[in-house]
Image (cartoon, rainbow, N blue to C red):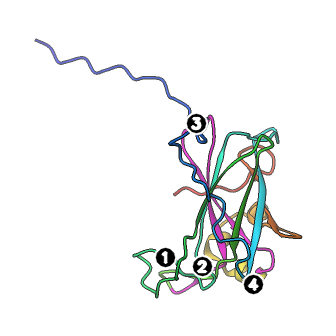
């Protein structure tokens, strides 16, 4: 008797679009990281765009971040906990690829080597046709000195750093995400 024949591989499957279905990954207060009226809160808006600059209508944008003091409500953060800090939001994209979050500006974060990371928001993108999530960061334009010293942002090609900087708007900030193509947002391997 010979060795068993290994099973044939199956074709790859794309992810979604099933994000908004009952039992999916969304929840009612998904984009509300903080409640409306929270001191220092603002609205972060953007659009998820494909390689041709067309909107991605069936994606999900997820953010996670530290609080205003740069603390996470997580057992691995040894600093004092932040009271009632969720620090996490999830928003489906609209037919125009739009997403939004109500949040606060995070504080700088200490690194294990004693440096400081500039205030930033971490972002995950999930969308139809993407087998793996992509991860990026949003930095703030009014943090020039902190941005210049940030060890992660400093490692990005200077010609591409602008893809990680939000743009101020009347109610907060704008951050469009281009999945590929001209002016593609910088994504990180995590």
User: Mark 4 to mark 1: distance in Å?
Assistant: 26 Å
The residue labelled by disc 4 is 145
Q: Which mark is residue 18?
A: 3
| Disc 4 and disc 1 in contact, CB within 8 angstroms | no
Q: Secondary structure at mark 1?
A: loop
Residue 176 seen: no
The residue labelled by disc 1 is 73
Q: Secondary structure at mark 3?
A: loop
Q: Which residues are magenta?
A: 114-143
Q: Earlier in the sequence, mark 3 or mark 2?
A: 3
The residue labelled by disc 2 is 67
Q: Earlier in the sequence, mark 4 or mark 1?
A: 1
Q: Earlier in the sequence, mark 2 or mark 4?
A: 2
The local crowd at label 3, few if under 14, some if 14 to 19, many if 20 or more residues have their Cα within 10 Å, is: some
Residue 115 painted magenta: yes
Q: Secondary structure at mark 4?
A: helix
Q: Which one is in front in this view, the residue at disc 2 or the one at disc 4?
A: 2
| Disc 2 and disc 1 in contact, CB within 8 angstroms | yes
């Amino acid at each position: 008797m010979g060795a068993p024949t290994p099973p044939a591989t199956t074709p790859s499957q794309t992810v979604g679009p099933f994000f908004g279905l009952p039992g999916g990954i969304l929840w009612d207060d998904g984009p509300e990281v903080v409640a409306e009226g929270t001191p220092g809160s603002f609205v972060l808006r953007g659009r998820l765009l494909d390689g041709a600059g067309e909107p991605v209508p069936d994606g999900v944008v997820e953010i996670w971040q530290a609080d205003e003091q740069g603390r996470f409500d997580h057992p691995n953060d040894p600093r004092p906990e932040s009271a009632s800090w969720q620090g996490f939001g999830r928003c489906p994209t609209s037919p125009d690829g739009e997403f939004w979050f109500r949040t606060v500006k995070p504080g700088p974060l200490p690194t294990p080597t004693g440096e400081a990371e500039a205030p930033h928001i971490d972002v995950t993108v999930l969308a139809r046709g993407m087998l793996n999530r992509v991860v990026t960061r949003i930095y703030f334009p009014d943090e020039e000195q902190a941005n210049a010293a940030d060890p992660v942002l400093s490692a990005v090609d200077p010609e591409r750093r602008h893809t990680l900087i939000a743009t101020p708007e009347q109610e907060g900030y704008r951050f469009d995400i281009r999945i590929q193509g001209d002016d593609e947002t910088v994504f990180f391997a995590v």
